[in-house]
Image (tube, helix red, strand yellow):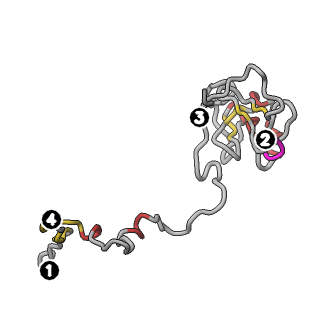
């Protein structure tokens, strides 16, 4: 086997008023033409995901309970379960939030009998309406598990990120 053939990544291009300029092959394209490296930037790596993101697959859950701010207990979880049994955290199926079962008033039976679970941030704490039923907006507290619709937002609530 012979030596590998060297291949330059650069090409020489004439630029008006400047002269010859060294340019990467992938950047040597005419104006108006598609960039040769455009396919690489599209991220075509197999099947493209469509629809909503899925908790646990597309993003990780918090490592602390959003109610008491403590992490999971050191007690071992039941094999193959991620349900907050024995002080471990139960992740919301709609967002990265996680809670201890006891912090959200759930029992082990509740957590195993239900399919998908939405944390308290997905319903108004007063009227229990979801965002879609409350005009598409819930005000979620940044430091506790409560959320409120516009009708039940406490007067003393501080809206973070609001323009002054």
Quickly name the residue at label 2: 111
Foreground tag (3 vs 2): 3
Alpha carbons under labels 4 and 1: distance apart: 46 Å
Q: Earlier in the sequence, mark 1 or mark 3?
A: 1
Quickly name the residue at label 3: 63
Q: Quadrant of the C terminus?
A: top right
Q: Residue furthest right?
A: 127
Quickly name the residue at label 1: 1
Dot 4 falls on a residue whose secondary structure is loop
Q: Is residue 99 above or below residue 9?
A: above
Alpha carbons under labels 3 and 2: distance apart: 18 Å
- Tell me: 107 left or right of 85: right
Q: Earlier in the sequence, mark 4 or mark 1?
A: 1
Quickly name the residue at label 4: 17
Q: Is residue 84 above or below residue 143?
A: below
* Span highlighted in magenta in the image: 130-134
Alpha carbons under labels 4 and 3: distance apart: 59 Å
What percent of the width, then of the height, locates residue 152?
83, 29
- Tell me: 11 left or right of 73: left
């Amino acid at each position: 086997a012979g030596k590998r053939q060297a291949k330059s990544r650069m090409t020489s291009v004439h630029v008006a008023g400047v002269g010859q300029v060294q340019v990467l092959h992938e950047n040597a394209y005419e104006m108006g033409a598609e960039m040769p490296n455009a396919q690489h930037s599209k991220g075509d790596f197999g099947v493209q995901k469509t629809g909503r993101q899925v908790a646990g697959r597309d993003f990780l859950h918090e490592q602390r309970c959003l109610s008491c701010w403590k992490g999971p207990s050191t007690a071992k979880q039941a094999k193959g379960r991620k349900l907050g049994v024995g002080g471990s955290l139960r992740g919301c199926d709609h967002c990265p939030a996680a809670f201890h079962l006891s912090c959200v008033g759930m029992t082990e039976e509740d957590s195993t009998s239900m399919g998908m679970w939405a944390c308290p941030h997905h319903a108004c704490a007063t009227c229990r309406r979801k965002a879609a039923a409350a005009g598409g907006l819930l005000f979620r507290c940044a430091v506790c598990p409560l959320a409120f619709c516009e009708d039940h937002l406490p007067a003393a609530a501080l809206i973070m990120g609001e323009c002054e």
